[in-house]
């Protein structure tokens, strides 16, 4: 069976846990995501450990955000680890995004538009007025114009982003929660089925899978629900 378009966020406190989660979920999902917690604790070695024998695709989520020269150096430094995807913040601007794209040519650069943890009130507090969707669409167009091949946005905005950037860009949505699940620190959320129906290519899901007593079964359950949705579509 083809693995589901899910990147499991391995936000683990130690390498053993991350490796265990990775081996449990990789039969069911296409990708695993290494973020700041693991990378800052263990460094580049974490990618080889998590990749393990399965050779699963790695999404390296470092959310780079600095001046173009510094981001170019950072992207070059991690490009040798061959992550499939690397994140940068779209608000770093077009020159910064372009620097990342040029410095990691084998890696898909994903520009994070507005963090899914921010509510509209939070966005207003940092000076982003109006509906989140407007700013997300503007940042999406800017990032694609600068060469980003992928975008990160909330599932609430993914349909508008798809309409803005067209079919060729990979749309990645965190802020995904199965119906009835605790939203925790996420503000702009939707279900896995809704995210896919609205045009997401890859769903980032962490705690709903890794917080389960059986992460393998939780990943398999969400993957099966996505397959059922795909089959029921006309
Ligand atoms: O870039 C990301 O992956 C990301 C962007 C964003 O806007 N929101 C967001 O939650 N994420 C990441 O997606 C994951 C979501 O995890 P859960 O909330 O546990 O499903 C975390 O690892 C976040 O770092």
Image: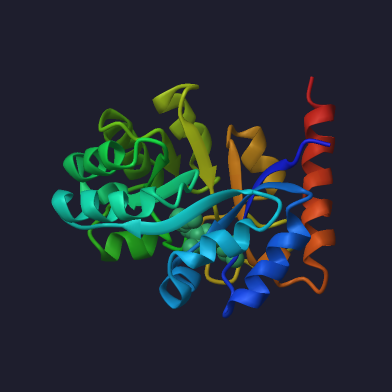
| Residue lying at 31% horizontally and 55% vertically, measured from the top left | 77
| Residue lying at 27% horizontally and 29% vertically, measured from the top left | 145
| Residue lying at 41% horizontally and 36% vertically, measured from the top left | 106
Q: Is residue 185 above or below residue 145?
A: below
- In the image, 35: left or right of 80? right
| Residue 204 at least partly seen | yes
- In the image, 32: left or right of 96? right
The x, y position of residue 89, in whole percent, is 32, 52
Q: Is residue 71 above or below residue 215?
A: above
| Residue lying at 26% horizontally and 42% vertically, measured from the top left | 97
Q: Nearer the viewer, residue 171 or 26?
A: 26
Q: Nearer the viewer, residue 86 or 187?
A: 86
Q: Nearer the viewer, residue 35 or 153?
A: 35
Which of the 4 image quarters holds residue 4? top right
Q: Nearer the viewer, residue 217 or 126?
A: 217
Outermost residue on the top side: it is: 234
The x, y position of residue 30, in whole percent, is 67, 44
Number of numbered callouts drawn: 0
């Amino acid at each position: 069976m083809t693995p589901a378009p899910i990147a499991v966020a391995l936000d683990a406190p130690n390498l053993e846990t991350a490796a265990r989660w990775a081996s449990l979920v990789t039969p069911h999902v296409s990708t695993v995501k290494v973020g700041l917690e693991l990378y800052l604790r263990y460094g580049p070695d974490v990618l080889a450990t998590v990749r393990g024998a399965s050779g699963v695709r790695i999404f390296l989520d470092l959310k780079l955000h600095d001046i173009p020269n510094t981001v170019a150096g950072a992207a070059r430094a991690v490009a040798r680890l061959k992550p499939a995807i690397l994140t940068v913040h779209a608000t770093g601007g077009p020159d910064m995004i372009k620097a990342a794209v040029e410095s990691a040519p084998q890696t898909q650069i994903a520009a994070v538009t507005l963090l899914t943890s921010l509510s509209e009130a939070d966005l207003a507090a940092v000076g982003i007025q109006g509906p989140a969707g407007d700013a997300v669409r503007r940042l999406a167009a800017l990032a694609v114009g600068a060469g980003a091949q992928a975008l990160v946005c909330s599932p609430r905005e993914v349909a508008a982003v798809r309409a803005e950037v067209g079919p060729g860009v990979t749309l990645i949505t965190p802020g995904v929660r199965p119906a009835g699940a605790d939203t925790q620190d996420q503000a702009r959320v939707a279900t896995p089925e809704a995210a896919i129906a609205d045009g997401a290519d890859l769903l980032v899901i962490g705690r709903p899978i890794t917080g389960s007593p059986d992460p393998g079964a939780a990943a398999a359950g969400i993957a099966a629900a996505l397959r059922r949705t795909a089959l029921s579509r006309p």
